[in-house]
Image (cartoon, rainbow, N blue to C red):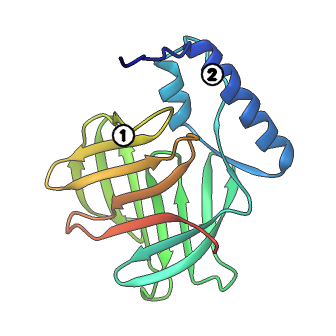
Amino acid sequence: MMVRQIVNPRLFLKSLSITVLLSVLAGCNVTFPQVDALRSQFSASSADSLTVPEDALWMASFQGEGRLLAAYQREGYVLFANADNDAEIEFDGWIIRSLSGFGMNSGTTLSISDEAGTRAFLTNGAESASVNCDEWKWTPRGHHLAGEWVQSCEGIASGTITLNEAGEIIAIDQALDRSGRRLILQRYKRS
């Protein structure tokens, strides 16, 4: 006989809130809106945010170039950068907003604007293409907060944001232009 355990969403959110609070008290944190959106499916009031400890490192890959980056909270976005100053990524919690470095010509910046479902790709401020995108959709995986946010855009592969069971972002995979050049960020695990 199989017994199915039902978890009270409010009790789960209270436990998760305590975990998030302890993480915040442990040091600097980076916040993302995905967990807030997920929690809002369980509760009408959700003030907690996803956290990433400051000691988390990220492996970024773009056009065959890889970099190990740290995440820094900035006003309204997260900056992924390294000490060599040869890679910089701005992420607003849903979309990679800009990328520079990674072996591109000095001074070249790829950026993305997103307004009302239309995503514009820009190189050094000049628009190179635009696509229409659907809303982000949540696909749960396993238990708790693990899963993927997936967004489809016309003519390019879907973008994904992957969360672990603690609700932390562990991977971001998004197209940075119409030709399909992708940036992949993965949380780096130290051995």
Q: Is residue 175 left or right of residue 105?
A: left
Q: On the image, which quarter does residue 132 sit in?
A: top left
Q: Residues within 10 Å of mark 1 (few under 14, many from 20)?
A: few
The kind of residue tagged 2 is Leu
Q: Looking at the image, which is closer to me, 102 or 21?
A: 21
**Depicted 119 relative to depicted 56: above or below:** above
Dot 2: element = helix
Residue at 42 percent of width and 17 percent of height: 4
The CA span between labels 1 and 2 is: 32 Å
Q: Position of residue 183 (x, y in %)?
A: 39, 67
Q: Position of residue 52 (x, y in %)?
A: 66, 51
Q: Position of residue 174 (x, y in %)?
A: 35, 58
The kind of residue tagged 1 is Glu
Disc 1: which residue: 115
Q: Is residue 78 left or right of residue 22?
A: left
Q: Looking at the image, which is closer to me, 127 or 14?
A: 14
Residue at 31 percent of width and 54 percent of height: 120
Count the labels in the image.
2
Dot 1: element = strand
Q: Quadrant of the N terminus?
A: top left
Q: Residues within 10 Å of mark 2 (few under 14, many from 20)?
A: some
Q: Earlier in the sequence, mark 1 or mark 2?
A: 2
Q: On the image, which quarter does residue 152 sit in?
A: top left
Disc 2: which residue: 13
